Amino acid sequence: MKVDRRLTSFEMFTLTSILIGIKLTDTTPSLFSQKAQNAFWYIPLLAFICILPAFLVLLYLLYKHNAKHFVHLFELLLGQGLGKSLAFIIFILSFVMIALDSRNYVEQIKIIYFQRSSILIIFALFGGVCIFGAIRGIEVVGYTTRIFWPFIRISFFILAALIFESVVWQRIFPIFGAGVPVILEEGVSKGSLFLDFFLLTMAFSAFRKPSQFIKGGLIGLIFSIAEITFFFFLYTTVFDYNSIEKISFPFHEVTQYVNLGDFFTNIETFFMVFWLLATFLRFILLLYLITWLFGAIFNIDEFELLLLPMGFFLMVIGLLPDNAVVTELIYRNKLLNIITPVIALVPFLLLLIHFFKRKKDLT
Amino acid sequence: MKTISLSGLLILFILIGCEDMVEVDRQSYVIAVGIDVTDQDGIYAFTYQIANPEAGSTLAGIGAEQTPDETITVVGTDIMTATNTANSFVTKQIILDQTRVLIVSEALARSDQFLRVMQSAARTTEIRRSIQIIVSKEDASDFINNNLPVLEQRPHKYYQYMLSRAKETGIIPDADLHRFFQITEGDADLFLGIYATTTYDPKELDGSEDEFIAGQVPKEGGNATQFMGSAVFKEGIMIDRLTGEETRICNILDKTMNINELLANYPDPLAPEYQVATDVFLTDNPKVNLSYDSETNHATIDVTVPFEVKVLAIPSLIHYSQNENFKRTLRDAIEQYITDATDELIKKSQEAYRSDPFYWSIYIRRHFKDIPAYEEGDWHKNIYPNADITVNYQLKRLHFGKMLDDTKLDEVRD
């Protein structure tokens, strides 16, 4: 297969959409609803509004300095030592995040579809697929995502159409859920939902033109946030606040609930195929990006050789927590709260230095 | 050599995927699960109706006499461990993926154990939220054993057709597990479960055909099982049962019930010894107008139900279709009859149940800013029992079907 060496804005759009949009299928909605109750559906929107300025600043700086990726940008602005150590902090945080995330998805596969298989084997297979996919490089990943993206989205919207008759929209009231202060706090502290996009800026130089990255990325972000909000809205109105707190995987609960008429019952496997495809694409991409980040920090040009050990370590860390409830409600929740200030403030710090430096250059 | 070892490794990977595989003919598909109380708290009797996939299929061939199902009862603490106990005499692995109904005896439904059993059912991955909850008057095991449908012998078809048809006529509610948890966990309204029985206890005929609960419908022949009316659950415990007609009113007033056509008959206003058979269409969802005074915690609810009626039969042979005065009388009579029945039900729910079976709590929610305030307001202890409720039925159109007029009785019999 001959692959175009450089990616375009449509591929960026699909990559962003797969990375961020797929979060609507995991435990994120249940995590949000623990505190925000029935107002959790617009928390991603609040989080997005909080984090958007940081992303715009980051994209602006990358563009202005013509940087290869954000580690390169850090080095340009902060100097080699400081830049690399800041990038390393981000690496550690995202590494743990991805490990917990992958555990989360493996847990879903196990609990919903393969109840008797051991988690180790599912994890090993999952890791194997991700490593195998990631070895092909970012161009192939982007290309594959572009091909499968429409199918994944169509299956999601079939699901939305089927569940629509169970929607009782009055369930979004009381509109402020658990109360305004709680909602605002949750919205601000969960900006790290978009950490994946931060990592995606590693691939800044893999595009034909930087403007294509920016255009595709921003449209992809807006599309994903609309999609997440729409699906969270469906969850709120289908399950109501007291039940959503207790359900770990609302997406799968919905796929089990819907029927296509009287004849086609139990159709969750149809959705599972596309969901699994999206999950694989997402983790292939994440594994590739995190390894790239590692390679960039330690000046390893042939970083693709590190995919195997990196995938292995992700699996080992992912296997540490006891069960899905602990992973989700304690570790992931805390980690999300820690990451938010980092990814929200670092771009502004860089911006300050950028202006400071320019002033110095002028004088 | 290298190729062989590589492909060996590949096969190893693929074969791991078969770890969870169970052949279809090594599984027993349970269609109905029945739960009964035993003498001991926390121990229940579980009845499984297992379908026989070979019965009734053309592949089985002529002459192969196979029963369509097998019913077994075991004692256990929850649904899943009981399936393991059952494997001491059931040859195959018991699978609950295809389960359509959960049958609970009235004795269990009325005890505080019910919610505990249901909770364990929800935790089971195999059990879907679209399972219907049926409350049987007798023990669930007796219900399953006595239920011997003649025409639909295959149990999954039987439950599917029986329930969907009864729901179309509006005499039973839509009562899936999903709805049960929404309402019970929402802690605001009454949940209606399907009421059914196989014991026959006919009631005196006194006019309308809907004022029955299951078991009272007079009939001859057919299956002993009757689905009629509903079991009222408050906070996860059954407190009462509603007749077919009351259930129908609940279905009309509840916008989340997707029922928009039902058959009903009303007393003939000009010849009270007869009934007028009608087909009632709901042209639109009922409009619930709820105003709320937060200071006194008092709500006023105005409900408008627009509907259309198609007259199916006028046994009294009065010329309702042609005479404007008669037509108006019939209109008023139908509106009056259904309004009276509704008012009675609302009064009963406010005074006896102190909560509503119409899922109206969704309309009060917009009057609160956040959930703590909403829970403070307490819909089904404070607001609903004291609310002023008026229900206004508006008969938009009266159709008379394909006949312009009925047979003129005096001309035939002169």
Image: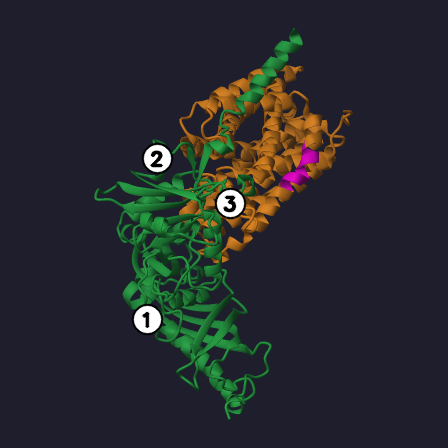
Q: Which mark is residue B86?
A: 2
- For residue B396, above or below residue B248: below
Residue that carries the numbered disc 3 in the rendered image? B56
What's the amino acid at mark 1?
Answer: Lys
Instruction: State which mark lies toward you, 3 or 2.
Output: 3
Can you name the residue that lies furthest to the top here?
B1
Please state, as top left, top right, bottom left or bottom right, where the C terminus of chain A lies in the image.
top right
**Circle 1 residue:** B347
Q: Residues within 10 Å of mark 3 (few under 14, many from 20)?
A: some
Same chain letter for marks 3 and 2: yes
Chain A visual colour:
orange
Measured Cα–Cα span from mark 1 to mark 3: 50 Å
Q: What is the chain letter for disc 2? A: B
User: Which residue lies at the image location 58% right of the left edge and 76% below the top edge?
Assistant: B401
Q: Residue at x 43, y 43 (%)?
A: B67
Q: Which quarter of the image is occupied by the N terminus of chain A?
A: top right
Q: Main secondary structure of the magenta part?
A: helix
Colour in which chain B is drawn: green
How far is disc 3 from disc 2 in space, using C-alphas? 25 Å
Sequence-wise first label, 3 or 2: 3
Image side of residue A1 versus residue B225, left or right:
right
Read off the magenta span. Answer: A145-153
Judge left or right: residue B175 versus residue B138.
right
Relative placement, left or right, of A332 versus A209 is left
